[in-house]
Amino acid sequence: MEDDASPRPRGDAASHLAGEDLAPYSQSELAARIALLEAEIARVEKHRQAAAAHRDAAEALFGAKE
C-alpha cells in the first residue's frame, strides 16, 4: 500500500467543509461541530493506524515492496 500524494477529489466531504461559511453558526453549534470533527479525526486516525499495522504485518511476512 503506497501513500497517495495526489490531491483529494474536489467533491469530498473535507473539501466541502473547509469551504463552508461558518458565520451563520452559533457558539454552541460551532462547539458541536468541533466535537463531531474531533470524533471523525479519531476514527480516521484509528483506521490509518490499523492500515499501517496491516501493511507492516504483510511486509514482515512477504518482505517490503520496492
Image: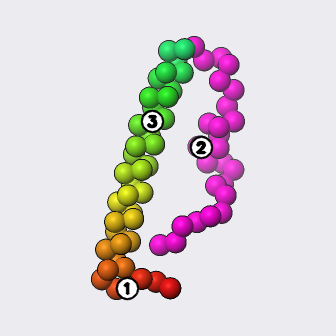
Residue in the picture at 46% in, 83% down: 65
The answer for how far apart the CA atoms under marks 2 and 1 are is 35 Å
Q: Look at the numbered disc 2 and give the secondary structure of its residue.
A: helix
Q: Position of residue 8 (x, y in %)?
A: 64, 55
In this rendered view, identify the residue nearer to me: 65 or 23: 65
Q: Position of residue 27 (x, y in %)?
A: 54, 14
* Amino acid beneath label 3: Glu
Name the residue beneath numbered marker 2: 14
Q: Position of residue 5 (x, y in %)?
A: 62, 64
Q: Looking at the image, is mark 2 or mark 3 earlier in the sequence?
A: 2
Which segment is the magenta one? 1-26
Q: Nearer the viewer, mark 2 or mark 3?
A: 3
Name the residue beneath numbered marker 3: 38
* Amino acid beneath label 1: Gly
The answer for how far apart the CA atoms under marks 2 and 3 are is 13 Å
- Answer above or below: position of 37 versus 11: above
- Find residue 63 and name its label: 1
Q: To which quarter of the image does residue 24 belong?
A: top right
Residue in the picture at 54% in, 67% down: 3
Left or right, 57 with reference to 11: left
The answer for how far apart the CA atoms under marks 1 and 3 are is 35 Å
* Amino acid beneath label 2: Ala
